[in-house]
Image (spheres, rainbow, N blue to C red):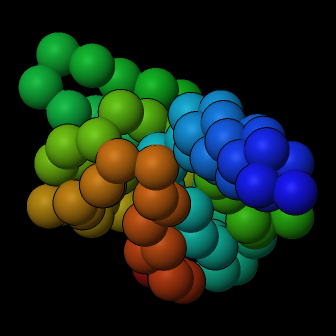
Amino acid sequence: MKTILLVVSFASLAIAFIAGKDLKSGINGTIDPPEGARKIWAISGTDSVQGAPLTGAFSIDVKPGNWSLLVEAVSPYKNAVINNILVLESQSTDVGVIKLRE
């Protein structure tokens, strides 16, 4: 019985470790109005990642660190910038709703 319990415990720890490696860091949020954004750029130092908002919502996988977002707007809306977005290891940072201005 102790052997079975030990094997099950070890297997559970191994699965938890492997599953933890699959968790990605990222930035997510929503654009208002949804049709106002063409692309979204996440920028940190010399790294940049782009994404496209689908129905206004977006999610971009990035490395942990301090990031800025640039929302590339469609006319008549203006681009929006959000600075100092802290992304932690294996966590997604929600920036909420980004309202585009005309």
Left or right: 94 as drawn, with respect to 37: left
Left or right: 85 as drawn, with respect to 40: left
Left or right: 27 as drawn, with respect to 21: left
Residue 5's x, y, as percent?
79, 56
- Of all residues, the one furthest to the top in this rendering is 46
Q: Is residue 47 above or below residue 59?
A: above
Tell me the residue at 70%/78% (across/down). Answer: 33
Toward which corner of the image does residue 3 lie, by quadrant? top right
Is residue 97 visible to the viewer in this orientation of the structure? yes
Q: How many numbered tags mark residues here?
A: 0
The one of 44 and 9 positioned closer to us in this rendering: 9
Q: Is residue 51 above or below residue 72?
A: above
Q: Is residue 26 above or below residue 101?
A: above
Tell me the residue at 22%/60% (across/down). Answer: 86
Residue 38's x, y, as percent?
66, 44
The one of 56 and 22 positioned closer to us in this rendering: 22
Toward which corner of the image does residue 58 lie, by quadrant? bottom right
Tell me the residue at 36%/62% (across/down). Answer: 80
- Of all residues, the one furthest to the front in this rendering is 1
Left or right: 97 as drawn, with respect to 78: right
Residue 6's x, y, as percent?
71, 48
Q: Can you say which quadrant of the picture contains the N terminus?
A: bottom right
Is residue 12 visible to the viewer in this orientation of the structure? no
Tell me the residue at 43%/66% (across/down). Answer: 93
